[in-house]
Every structure is written in structure tokens, then in C-alpha cells.
Image: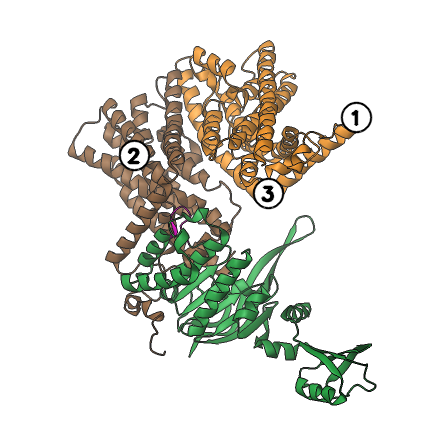
Amino acid sequence: MNVIETRELRKEFSVRVRRGLLRRERRTVAAVDGVDLTVQRGELLGYLGPNGAGKSTTLKMLTGVLHPSGGRVTVCGLTPVPQRIQLARRIGVVFGQRSQLWWDLPLRDSFELLRHIYRVPGGEHAARLRRCRDLLDLDEFLDTPVRQLSLGQRMRGELTAALLHGPQILFLDEPTIGLDVVSKQAVRGFLAELGERGDTTIVLTTHDLADIERLCRRIVVIDHGRVVHDGGIDALHARYGSQRRVVVDFDVAPAAPPVLPGVHLESATGPRLVFTLDGSASVGTLVSALTALGGLRDLSVAEPEIEEVIARLYRH
Amino acid sequence: MAEPSAATAAAPAGADRTVPVTTADVADAPASTAAIYRALLRAQVRAQASYRASFALDLASNVIFLGADLLTVLVLFHQVPALAGFTLAESLLVFGLAALGFALADLAVGNIERMKQHVRTGLLDAVLIRPLGVLSQLLVLDLGVRRVGRVITSTAVLAVAAYQAGVRPTPANLLLLVVTPLAGAVFFGSVFVATATVAFWWVESGELSAALTYGGRDFTSYPMTVYGGWFRHLMAFGLGFGLVAYYPALILLGRPDPIGAPAWLGWCGPLLALAAAALAALVWRTGVRHYRSTGS
Amino acid sequence: MGFITATADRLPIRNFTESAGLIRTLGASGFRRFSTYRQATVAATATNTMFGFLRTYVMLAVAGSAAALGGQAAGYDAPRLVTYVWAGQGLIGVVLLWGWTDLADRIRSGDVVTDLLRPVHPVLGYLLPDLGRAAYALLTRFTVPIAVGALAFDMYVPRRAATYPLFALSVLLALLVCFAGRFLANAAAYWLLDSRGVLMTWAVCSGVLGGLYFPIRFLPDWAAAVLYFGTPFPSLLQVPLDVLVERDPPLSQLGLLGLQAGWAVLLLWGCVAVQRRAERRLVVQGG
């Protein structure tokens, strides 16, 4: 079933533009310009785009913080803004740059307060907290005031805080921003585990491509308020012409390299040949053709870098 | 929807049904809502007490600021025996009624004047994703417990002034002495909320709301006869500040109004307070709606 | 810790042209920075104007009562008090009594060490932009309340031509005293974890003892004398306002300016001394 559905979702802001010394003009800018999005239960969706593309605005409309200017949106079968309080119980939100926690109190107290706020039965709360404590190693700083936590520790606290009421959907806005490598891995590992269990839908925005490669099976790319890609990483590669590369070393440089459809010889320097393959070409066919030549010493296949793909995407 | 999984079972479907669908900010089941706010309030007190030195200092500085206002009245009366027809004790009665009403409002909702920071820092967004009312959360999150010193001091000033001014302890007078600061608190609280709402439209509004909150307090701290012209009419009757302290004080003093208003006006404070609260609620709702349609 | 040594070789300013250029640049930066806070200026000016009305009526009531008894309130007649109030409301923003926490914020965030890297003495590095800011405030936050007050009430206009330059000089001295006071209150953050108390004390004292709430001359003579000679606060508003409304004869006006100048020198020297100790502390603790 679909936990998120948007149709022609729009958000316009009016901005004032200075024209000359005194004249100011009001102009309407669409931050989100007709987004159709369907997310099914249990999906782990990466929501990508350059700065100012409309990622956070979309997330705010999905969570009931902002009212859409146009289009329809349902989350967990509810309309976010008018049914904000009901929705709030069913979703968890982590804004990477903002805290849900009580700055001056120990982490443990924040969790206890959230239990009250979300009216979670004691047993369920304890069970979820135990699981998060184990998976995120919270125990060593559970009694430390939040203001004294490192960013990585705080983020682990934020994740726990967002999950204690057992949300159906977890929204994460830049959850790994500014974290050290170890904390990033802890957060990613935790989210991957959560995603694999399949009962929590996860929507995350990020700039960190490692997050996407590690976590997301589906990627939605938004630019200038519009969805420019919706699909898996493979589809992204195919669509944006990212090319795999095969590097072969022979004992002696072959006289006639094989010619196959979709395969291009990029370079031939001595005994080393480098081929690039279009999305449709098969590595297997190339490899068997190369083996047939004889004298093959070494062969490696380089998958295209996701960063390259995304960079190319943003340049459009 | 598929059967609720272990993870989703926590969303209390039963509780949801009691929530009105149309108005998101109305609180639900009253008993347990009160418990939630009690827990939030306790946490707030604990958090503030963790800064022991700052807490003591804030407590002291609040009393000092009130002392500065009081000192001003005393210094003025050091120059002249009466101010616009009122003696020191009579003036202090007006001052005490206004100060206590303001101190109570400041204690309960005064921190709403930090709305601008809340909008700027995104705290408002964090508040909007929780299943509770927006205004009530902001108030509890930031309650000025330290302002309690001001309440105690103003109460003392009011008691001394009432004694010095020779207010007769009739039941009606005693009732008025209790009701007036409470109505004043509601009124000032409404002014705080209504003016803080400006931040939804105008984040850079700076100290503008102080013109009506602190300005209103200063206005009500002196007998209305001090002021003149359109300014008095606008503030006393147009905005209603005249009913906060001056007219109740006239009843307590048993004096007719030199400006010529009827005596029963002194009993109208609570009505005004209710009207102001209703208006403030309306302004607040409009502000939140505006925020949601523009965002940060 | 290499960067700390940079303070020792702070570039000497070689000649007049160079220092004039520096002063111009830094001053202009303060002016420009504050001219971009246009909305905040509008809001603050509106608030100052509102309080101008409130304080004027109270002062007029005092003058009225005094006149009914056939006298004046501490030597001020009604028009003088009106000018006193409105010019005072205008000067709040020029000398900037409260609301300046730049230095304390930079100390808390640690950004303050970059001040030591600049080829300007840190005290001067904060003072010059503050002068630029004051120039902008003079054009906006000072003029509007004066204009409103003049339209709504009967104001006293100085009779002696010499009063105008004396007032201008007095405002400049008040600004120097106020800057130094703010700087010192902010610098408490070098030693205190939470310096809000010091800043708050400064805010209360500068308002009440500076002559904003009531003219200090309303106090008994001994109390006023203690404040004038024992504290810098009357130098912030009371002195320039007294000069403006010609409360005293010309010779006394000069005396008051001398007092202000004394406080300005003393407090600025205090700033330099405090800055030196703070730098030593930064060196020891490594920022």
C-alpha cells in the first residue's frame, strides 16, 4: 500500500526583488513545481537534488510543517496540515541541523518526555529504547546532558527520539551531515537494518552519496522543483549514459581488438587496452571475445561512480 | 492498510479518534494532556535549574528591573508632592496593580517574545512535528520560572500601596484587588501573544513588540490623568489599557474619575481580558497559518 | 599557537594618510553594515518613539505639578523636559545603550582570536565600526524621534549658538564612554562562562543611572554628585541632554564635557588594559 502519495504537489513563495533604488517587485517562485511521488510501505527512498532544489520544502509539506500551494498530498492516509497531530504520531522526523532533544537535560530525560508527548505505553517504549540502545550504543552517554554530546552522539539520540513512538514513516533531512566517519557508519548501518525489516518506510535527503549507495534502492532526484529521475541506481546509470569500463592487460599487444556493438576502444597503450561499454552492452560478450584472442593476463571491470552520475545530472 | 506491524502499533489509533480533524491545534483528551504538560514543565524547571548561577542572576535582575521602575516613581515624587492630581500612595496603587498583572503575564507567556528566534532557528518546525498544540508547546518549552521574583516583589508593592493609600478592606475591594491583577495578566498575556505574532510576517521586527508590551506596562503604571490628548484616548480606551489598573484603582480609592468616566468601568477588566484573549487567539491562528503557507 | 605571536608584530601604522585611510575604511564598514539592517532600524525607531510619548507625558505632569507650586522641577521647565525626553530617545540608538554583544559572542565562539590577526589594535577594530554605526543611527534613529517630538509637543530650542558644537562634542564623548563601557562588559566573557549578568547590570545601570528613566538632577544633590563623579553613567545621556537643553551656564557645560572626557579616557584605557590581559590569557590557554 502507498504510505505517501502526492499529485502535482506545488509550493510557491513570493519573494521581493529589488529593482533600482527604491522599487521592489514581488515575484512568485515555485520551490516545488508539480511533484508526483508514490512511496510504498517499507521503501527506503533517497531524495536528492542540489541546494535549493526543493528537497526540504517537499519534506516540510509531507510532515505538515508547511501548507502546499497546490496539488494533493496524503501521508499515511492523512492530509498533513489539517491532520497534523494525528500524522505527528505516525511519523518520525529528524532534521539534521535542528534538535528534537532537550538541550540541558540528559538524553534519557528527553526520551522519557517524548514517551509522554506521544503517549507511548511504557512497555513498548522500553522495548524500542532497548533496541536503539543496543544498535546505536547509546548507553555510554545516556545520562549526559544533550549540550555536552558530540554531533555524532547527538544524531544517534535524534534517531532514537524519532523512532520511540514507532512511526510508520521516518523522514530524515541530511542525517549524516557533519558527522565523523565512524558515526556516519553507525547511522547508515542502523538505517540499513531498519530498512531491511521492512515495516518502516524511510525517506531521506542527503548530499552524501555514500548514504545513497549504501542505503537506497530507489532514488528520486529533484531539480528546480521538479522530479528529474525516479528509479534505482542502475536506471540512473542507464539513463544518464554512465559507462562501465573494462581494462585488459595482455602479454603482447593484440593485433586486432574485438569490435562489438556498444563497445568502444578508449585507449590502447602497449599491452593494455581500455574499453568503455554503453548501458546496453554486455561485459560477458566482451570478455569471451577477449579470451578468444589468447594471452590475456589481467582484466578488471570498473563500475561507474555514482558521484559522476549525480554531478552530470545536476549540470543539466 | 495492512495489519499494524510491531513498529507501528505504538501509534495509538484509539487516541487519534478523539482529535478534532479540522483544527489541528486544539488539544485532545484533557486529563492526559495536562499530564503531558506537567511533565514538560517539570523538565523545563530542571533544565533551568541546571544553570544555577545564571538562574539566581536572572531572578535578581528581574527584581532589579522592577526596582528601577519603582525608583523612577519615587524620584518623581521626590520632586513634586502630587502627579496629575494623585499622591504617591495612590500612584503606587496604580503602579502595583499594573506591575503584578504584568509580572504574572511575563511569567506565563513573556518568553513568547522570542518568537522571532524560534522562526529563525527552526524551533517552530520542530514544534510543528509533535502531536501537541503549537502555542502551548512554545510557552512550556521556554517558561520563565526565573520571573517569579518579579511576581513576589510586585505583590509586596501592591500590598504596601493598598495599605498606605487607605483602601478599605470591604469584600468588594478585596475581590477587586484579586481580580484586577488576574485580568491584567490575561490582558498583558494577550498583548504578548498578539504582538509576538508579528514575527510570522516580519522576522526582522526586532523590539517592535516591546512598544506595546513594555510600553503598555509603562502606560498603565501611572494614573491616566498624566497623559493627554489623542494618545490617552488611543491607549486607554482604543487599546483598553485604561481598564488594567487605573479604573479599578479609582474604585479602591473611592475617587471619581477626574476625566469623567463612570465608576463601574473599574469592574470591566475581566470582560476586556476575555475579549483580548479571544482576539489574541485569532491573531495567533492567522499567524501560524501564514507561516505554514510561506515557511522559512 | 603560532598565530598568537602575530599580535606582537601588529603592524605599526606608519603615517597619517595610512591611519586616515584605515579609520575611513573601518568606520565606513560599520555604517554600511547597519544600513543593511533597515527593517530593524525602523522597528527600533518606532519603539523609541512610543516610549518618547510615554515619558514626555510623565515629565509634563511633573513640570505641571512643579509649576502649580510656583517652581521648576530641578531647574527644568516643561519645554526643556520635552526636549530632554525626545533627544534622549534619539540618543539611545546613537550611543547604543544596550543590545551590543558582538564581542561577548565572538569570545564565546572563539572567533575572537581572528581579531588578533588583524593589523589593527582590537579595541580600535571595534571602536571604528561603532563610530560608523553611530553615524548611521544619527541620521535615522536620532532624527525621527526629534521630529516626532517637535511635531507633537512644545520643545525647547537651544538659544546659545555655542550649545550646538558643545552638544555634538558631548554626544561624541558619550559614544566613546558608552562604547568603552559596553566593551568592558562584553570582555567579562573572557573570564566568566556566562557573562549575561554583567551585560544585564550594564543595561540597568546605564538606563536608570544614565538619565533615561528620569533626569539624575531629580535626585538629592549628594546622590547626583556621587553618580557624576563616581560612575560613568551620567556621561552617557544625562550630560549631553543637559548641554542640549542649556540646563547650566556655558562654563558649567564645559565642566561637564571635561568630566565626560575624563571618563572616556579612563574607560578606554581600561579597555586597552583588559584587552592586554585577555590576550595574555589567550596565549596561555591557546585560545
Residue C19: quadrant of the picture: top right
Labels 3 and 1: the sequence-earlier one: 1
In this view of the protein, can residue B181 be seen by the observer?
yes
Q: In this view, does B87 lie above or below A3?
A: above
Give the class, few, some or many, for how many residues have Cα within 10 Å of label 1's Cα (few <14, many ≥20). few
Give the class, few, some or many, for how many residues have Cα within 10 Å of label 3's Cα (few <14, many ≥20). few
Which subunit holds the residue at mark 3? C
Could you say which is closer to the camera, residue A34 or residue C127?
A: C127
Q: In this view, does A226 lie above or below B61?
A: below
Q: Position of residue B115 (x, y in %)?
A: 45, 48
* Element class at badge 2: helix
Magenta stretch, residue numbers: A101-107
Chain letter, colour brown in render: B
A129 horizontally vs B168: left or right: right
Q: Specify the amino acid type for callout 2.
A: Tyr
Q: Position of residue B166 (x, y in %)?
A: 22, 23
- Magenta stretch: helix, strand or loop mostly: loop
Which residue bears the numbered disc 3? C37
Q: In this view, does A103 lie above or below C233?
A: below
Give the class, few, some or many, for how many residues have Cα within 10 Å of label 2's Cα (few <14, many ≥20). many
Which residue bears the numbered disc 2? B247
The C terminus of chain A lies in quadrant:
bottom right
Chain letter, colour green in render: A
User: For the residues marked 1 and 2, what is the alpha-carbon distance in whole angstroms?
Assistant: 68 Å
Q: How many labels does the image show?
A: 3
Q: Where is residue A274 in the image (x, y as percent from the top left)?
A: 76, 78
Residue C169: quadrant of the picture: top right
Task: Point out which mark residue C15 bears.
Answer: 1
Q: Specify the amino acid type for callout 1.
A: Asn
* Mark toward the viewer: 2 or 3: 3
